[in-house]
Amino acid sequence: MESNGNIKIRSTPKLSTLNGHRATFSNGQTSYYAVTQRNIYGTDNPQTSEITNYEPIDAELGLTIKPMVSGDGQVTLDIFVIQSSFGLRIAEDAPPDLSSREFSSIIRVHDQDIVVLGGLEEQVKNDSGTGVPFLARIPVIKWLFSSRKREDSKSKLTVLIKPTVIY
């Protein structure tokens, strides 16, 4: 069985802010994990009580821009981008792994110029197999008693910024 797929996501958020003030865009996902607190009280006949709380953890794509407009029509942009994503959980109530990639830059451009930010690329290759013990290791008949699974994924984040000064 073979399957193939392509996904292309394009988002065009627009941010407005005042000169010297920050504008923030965030798009993400929240996951929860259990935190259990056990209390033991009493000396002669100890009693225990448990309290379980669910703590949030966020994975997001975040963009923060602080523009500073000069008198000659140029805009200095203080830019910060963070991209985080969830990984696997060790246990159901454990927090998920969180991997983050980020970059920051200060750029000076003319009004209406386009700034292209890139470099947040990820390539993941996963090769796994299952099979009947011992029979899956015999060279010729292993194809009957085992299966292999290969997964390749690539992601690339490119941010286009077009500062526009409105008087």
Image: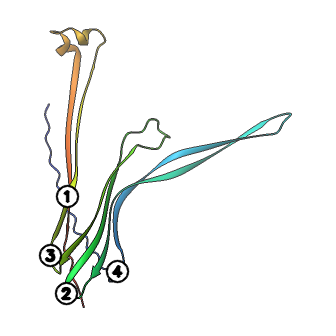
Q: Are marks 4 and 2 in contact (CB under 8 Å)?
A: no
**Mark 3 residue type:** Asp
Looking at marks 3 and 4 on the same chain, the residue that comes earlier in the sequence is marked by 4
Looking at marks 1 and 2 on the same chain, the residue that comes earlier in the sequence is marked by 2
How far apart, in angstroms, are the residues tagged by discs 3 and 4?
19 Å
Looking at marks 2 and 3 on the same chain, the residue that comes earlier in the sequence is marked by 2
How far apart, in angstroms, are the residues tagged by discs 3 and 1?
16 Å
Which of the labelled discs sits on residue 20, or is there none? 4
**Mark 4 residue type:** Gly
Tell which tag, 1 or 2, sits nearer the viewer. 2
Depth order, front residue of 73/51: 73
Element on which disc 1 rests:
strand
Q: Which quadrant is home to the C terminus?
A: bottom left
Q: Residue at x 25, y 9 (%)?
A: 135
Tell which tag, 4 or 2, sits nearer the viewer. 2
Q: Is residue 8 above or below residue 79?
A: above
Which residue matches tag 1? 118
Looking at marks 4 and 1 on the same chain, the residue that comes earlier in the sequence is marked by 4
Tell which tag, 2 or 3, sits nearer the viewer. 2
Q: Position of residue 143 (x, y in %)?
A: 17, 15
Residue 62 as seen in the image, left or right of residue 46: left
Depth order, front residue of 38/78: 78
Depth order, front residue of 84/29: 84
Which residue matches tag 2? 72
**Mark 1 residue type:** Gly
How far apart, in angstroms, are the residues tagged by discs 2 and 3?
14 Å
**Mark 2 residue type:** Asp
Q: How crowded is the residue under tag 4: few (<14 C-alpha within 10 Å), some, or many (20+)?
A: some
Which residue matches tag 3? 113
Element on which disc 2 rests:
loop
